[in-house]
Image (cartoon, helix red, strand yellow):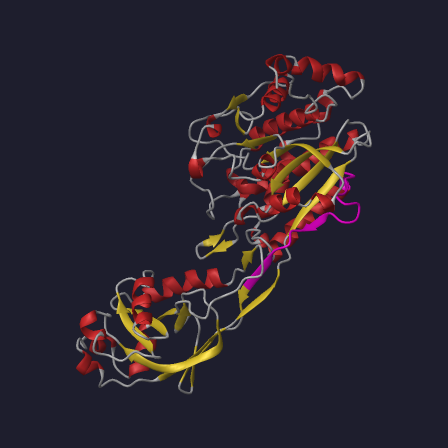
Amino acid sequence: MKITLIISLAILTLSANAQSPKFKSKYLNSIDSTSLKQHVYVLASDSLQGRDTGSEGEHKAARYIVNYFKSAGLKPFNDTTYLQNIGLWSWRWDSFQFKLKDKQLIHYEDIVYLSTAPIEPSISSQCIFIGNGNDSITDHLNMKNKIAVALADNLNSWYSLASKTKRDGAIALVMVHQSDSDAFSKLSAQMKAKHNKQSIYRSRPSFSNNLTKAFAISHDCLESLFNNSLETLSGYQTAKAIKQLPQPELTITCPIIIEKANANNVAGYLPGKTKSQETLVISAHYDHVGERYDGICVGADDNASGTAAVIELAKAFAPLKGKLDKNIVFLATSGEEKGLLGAFYFADHPQEHVFNIKANINVDMIGRIDSTHKSNYIYTIGNNHYPEFDSLLHVANNLLTPITIQYDYNKTQGFGNFLRLSDHYAFHRINIPVLGFFSGLHPDYHKPSDTPDKINYREMEQRVRLIFTTAFLATQKTAFNTQDD
């Protein structure tokens, strides 16, 4: 694009008001901190369980967003439904079964599975005690087709020993912490939270029968297995002594359920005044990371804040239905935390709608004040690639009480390349101009402590008003229609 075109963009944009509505501050009146706070508190409530992709908590959030899109007068994105299934698969654990001779072991109380490899049908084999798993012991034991049981100093570092015993012929490894009686219960709580979540895949998952299988057991369970105390078993340091121990039979079943994931984008659109189908997409992801062993990650800033902004923007734009030069699609995506899956799906499936997407504004984490600021700022992402968007942003900022525009996250590389780390990247990669809004990182990121009480709603209101004004200018006829020479 020529420099002269960039410099004159503001004049061209404002001159287009002969055909388009002129910006008026009254359009901003419905954007207020009270409404934003209400949305954040609902979306980041414990009842939504962290809005994990495809979960019931996320479905509740989707229904909430749909209701507000309807009340704003948005039309379903494909004129049929506000929900766009994003074509994912999921797997989750079914009922674990463990049987020691005639006794049923209780999952999470006696034993816990550490691997991700399903075990179905059951495996049933003798258990062989191998002490601490040193070569001086295992080299003299026959582990072929048996379940190796070992003492360990760290139940989380199981893979190396599990691989070693597998090479020696064992079909699974069972570990017990040799000193810390609380280690099992702590690990079990972590694994229970992990097992209660479904895993999401782009395509139907498959599993090799050859995957390593590892378990942890409690001290009491170990003593039941071998009819000896932990202290006694710790004294067995030779293969000759270990061979005198019983080898009880353990039967294990760890089945999974594979099914299509019910994970959906929520999308509605505000029709413009022309039939060209030129469209601005305003997006924010509404999913989060769900529940962990230490609590529910409610995701107030990430990204109830961005979702609340999109809901408020839909309400604010509602009086302009049929008056703007471009349609506006309001898009709340699923699967962002799994790898921008919902945004990729929307961008890669134009056959599911009629829109000619000219630009994307993405809102991800706009509710907090980071450690380098006190107030009155916003980070923007992508505008270093799209000078026209940057010009629109500054025109918009000058129509309001200006806030400081920060470019720091446009400069990062590698994993810190924030252009690639949120939904705007799905559009950028197919050469659609993007502009991301972001208030910066904080210590509560992806933790249960990212709660609604930590949001600065007055600051958030000013940011949403800037986003509205930038979006308003982006819907003008002249915006994103200039040609390179």
Where residue 192 sits in the image (x, y, percent)? 46, 64
Where residue 166 sits in the image (x, y, percent)? 33, 71
Dividing the picture into quarters, in which one does residue 143 lie? bottom left
Q: Which residues are magenta?
A: 71-91
- In this view of the protein, can residue 174 be seen by the observer? yes
Q: Measuring 26% from the left and 63% from the top, which residue is drawn there?
A: 153
Where residue 247 sits in the image (x, y, percent)? 30, 84
Using the image as rendered, state which of residue 333 and residue 386 is in the foreground.
386
Using the image as rendered, state which of residue 357 and residue 255 is in the foreground.
357
Left or right: where 80 falls relative to 181: right
Where residue 112 sits in the image (x, y, percent)? 41, 69
Using the image as rendered, state which of residue 447 and residue 419 is in the foreground.
419
- In this view of the protein, can residue 298 be seen by the observer? no
Q: Measuring 55% from the left and 56% from the top, which residue is drawn there?
A: 201
Q: Measuring 56% from the left and 31% from the top, which residue is drawn there?
A: 437
Using the image as rendered, state which of residue 148 and residue 177 is in the foreground.
148
Looking at the rendered image, the quarter that the N terminus falls into is: top right
